[in-house]
Image (cartoon, rainbow, N blue to C red):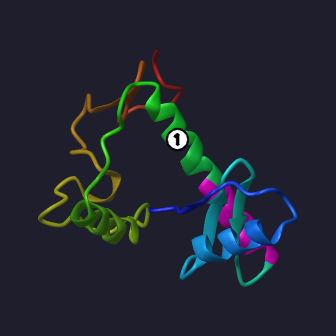
Amino acid sequence: MDIRCAPYATYGTQALSDAALIALDSRRACLLGNHGVIALGQHLSAALGLAGEVENLAQQYLLSLLGGTPRLLDAAEMLHVVEKFKNYGQGRPSSPDDPGGHDGHDGQPGAELRFGGVTRRLDTPGPPDR
């Protein structure tokens, strides 16, 4: 997701308004330098949900910087991920490029998911192991 960030301008000024409109061109959300997020939606709950998503992505990006330069996905991989995400969690059958099916693992006993210092066995219920 490419989220534009408008340059800083003093709150309540025409300059800030103009910068926001440029950053929002053909978009539903943007960041305002040193201010925060602006999000648009058909109704308040849609705008609020989008604002929360942008804030979450910003937090994830900042946290990923702690480990060095994050690996950004190229445009082709982003399109692939977006397409796969359309069926995420819907129990669809496996496909040739996703032999593990909808849950992203091979279903074999002992399969694990590791992220940072947390390990989660995929074939057992309960909290992650540390």
Q: Position of residue 122 (x, y in %)?
A: 36, 36
Mark 1: give few (<14), some (14-19) or many (20+) Cα within 10 Å: few
Q: Residue at x 84, y 66 (%)?
A: 13
Q: Is residue 73 above or below residue 17?
A: above
Q: Quadrant of the rendered structure where residue 111 is?
A: top left
- Considering every residue shown, the one lying at the far left of the view is 96
* Residue 125 in sight: no
Q: Secondary structure at mark 1?
A: helix
Q: Is residue 55 above or below residue 96?
A: above
Relative placement, left or right, of 96 versus 102 is: left
Q: Position of residue 6 (x, y in %)?
A: 61, 61
* Residue 11 in sight: yes
Q: Quadrant of the rendered structure where residue 95 is?
A: bottom left
- Residue beneath label 1, please? 60
Q: Nearer the viewer, residue 7 or 74?
A: 7
Q: Main secondary structure of the magenta part?
A: helix
Q: Nearer the viewer, residue 123 or 76?
A: 76
| Amino acid type, label 1 | Gln
Q: Is residue 43 above or below residue 65?
A: below
Q: Residue at x 53, y 26 (%)?
A: 127
Q: Residue at x 16, y 56 (%)?
A: 99
Q: Quadrant of the rendered structure where residue 14 is?
A: bottom right
What span is in magenta?
Answer: 44-54
Quarter occupied by the N terminus: bottom left
Q: Position of residue 15 (x, y in %)?
A: 75, 68
